[in-house]
Image (spheres, coloured by chain):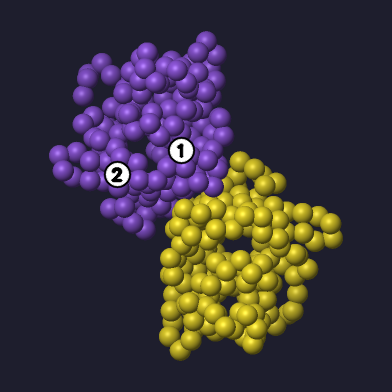
Chain colours: A purple, B yellow
Amino acid sequence: MNDTMKKAAIEADPTVPIIRVTRDFATTQARLFRAHTDPELFVRWVGPDGMTTTLDRWDANTGGSWRYVAARDGVEFAFHGCFHEVRPDRIVQTFTWEGDPDGVALETLTFEDLGSGRTRLRTQSLCDSFESRDAWLRSGMEVGVDQGYAKLDVLLAGTGEGAEA
Amino acid sequence: MNDTMKKAAIEADPTVPIIRVTRDFATTQARLFRAHTDPELFVRWVGPDGMTTTLDRWDANTGGSWRYVAARDGVEFAFHGCFHEVRPDRIVQTFTWEGDPDGVALETLTFEDLGSGRTRLRTQSLCDSFESRDAWLRSGMEVGVDQGYAKLDVLLAGTGEGAEA
C-alpha cells in the first residue's frame, strides 16, 4: 500500500453493531453516484489492488439485485445482495459474503454535495450482532476500502469513461 | 381483539436494536412458507383485522422485490422492500414503511419444522438505532402481529386454497 494514500475514516459504533466509513472525493455527487451504479465503472475500482471483479448480476435500481465475484491469485470471493433503494443521493442495499452465506448486512451509502465539485461519501454497514460486526473489522477490510477508493480517485481524475459521467 | 387469541412472543433485545417474534403454527414448513410467498395467500392474512392489503409489486424470490398498500377506513399505509434471500426455511428481506421513507429494517424469517405437522416461525427485525426499534414497539405492532397470525391460523385450518399448499 502507498504510505501516502488517503485514508477513509472507519468508525465502529459503541452502542449498535454498525461500521461507518467516511471519505471525501474530488468529484460531483452525480459522478460519485454513477461510479457506484454503472457496472463498467464499478468493477474498475471496487476492492483491493490486484483483485479482478466480475459482475454476475447487476441491476442497480430500487428493487433490483446484484452479485459479483472477486478473484486474485486463483482465489475467489463472491458477494450478493438486493438494492432496497437507489436514488441520486442514497443507496440502500443488502450485502452477503458467500463464505458466510447466512450473514447479512444492511448497507446505506449517502452522497453529500460539499460544493466546489467535492462530495462526501458515507457508508453505514449494520450487522445483527457485535460479533459479526467485529469480525468484519478484524478482516482487514480497511485495505480493500482504502485501495478501492484510491482507484476510484484515479478513475474520477482520468480522462476516460469515468470522467465523462 | 379476541381475549382468547393466541399471542406471539415479542422480545426486544437488550443489546442490539432487534425485535424478535416467535409463533408456532399447526402446519408444515412448506405450507407456512407458501403462506408467506404466495401473493394470493399472503394478502388474506397479513395485518390487523379490517385492513385490506393490495399488492403493488410481488416477486418473492431471491433478488426480487415487493410493495403493498394496506387500507382501512380510507386510510392507507404503504410498505416496500426487496427480497435478499427466499428459500424454504428462511426469508431475508428489507422493510420500509413509507410514512418514514428513509427508515429501513432488515427482516429475517425462519421456518423451523417441529415435527408432527407443527412449524415454528421466528422473525427478527433489525433496525439501525434503538430509537427506531422502540418506535416500532410503541406503535401497537403486536395488534397487527397477533390478529394477522390468527387469520393465518384460520386460513391454514381451512379447506380452501390455503389448505391445499
Q: Where is residue A102 in the image (x, y as percent from the top left)?
A: 37, 58
Q: In this view, does A50 lie to the left or right of B63?
A: left
Pointer 2 chain: A
Q: Image quadrant for the N terminus of chain B?
A: bottom right
Residue B53 lies, with reference to residue B111, above or below; the image says: above
* Foreground residue among B3 and A98: A98
In this view of the protein, can residue A153 be seen by the observer?
A: no
Q: What residue type is labelled 1?
A: Gln
* Residue drawn at (51%, 37%) of the image: A91
> From mark 2 to mark 1, how far is it between C-alphas?
22 Å
Q: Mark 1 points at which residue?
A: A124
The chain carrying label 1 is A
Category of crowding for the residue at label 2, using alpha-carbon neighbours closer than 10 angstroms: few (below 14), some (14–19), many (at least 20) = some
Give the quadrant of residue B156: bottom right
Residue A113 location, quadrant:
top right
Question: Mark 2 sits on what residue?
Answer: A69
Please tell me which of labels 2 and 1 falls first in the chain. Answer: 2
Give the amino acid at mark 2.
Val
State if disc 1 and disc 2 touch (CB < 8 Å): no
Residue A1 position, x and y percent, is 21, 24
Secondary element at tag 2: strand
Residue A4 visible: yes
Q: Along the horizontal axis of the image, is B4 left or right of A2? A: right
Toward which corner of the image does residue B112 lie, by quadrant? bottom left
In the rendered view, tell whether residue A76 sits above or below residue B137.
above
Residue at point 47% right, 72% down?
Answer: B111
Residue A88, numbered circle: none
Q: Do labels 2 and 1 share a chain?
A: yes
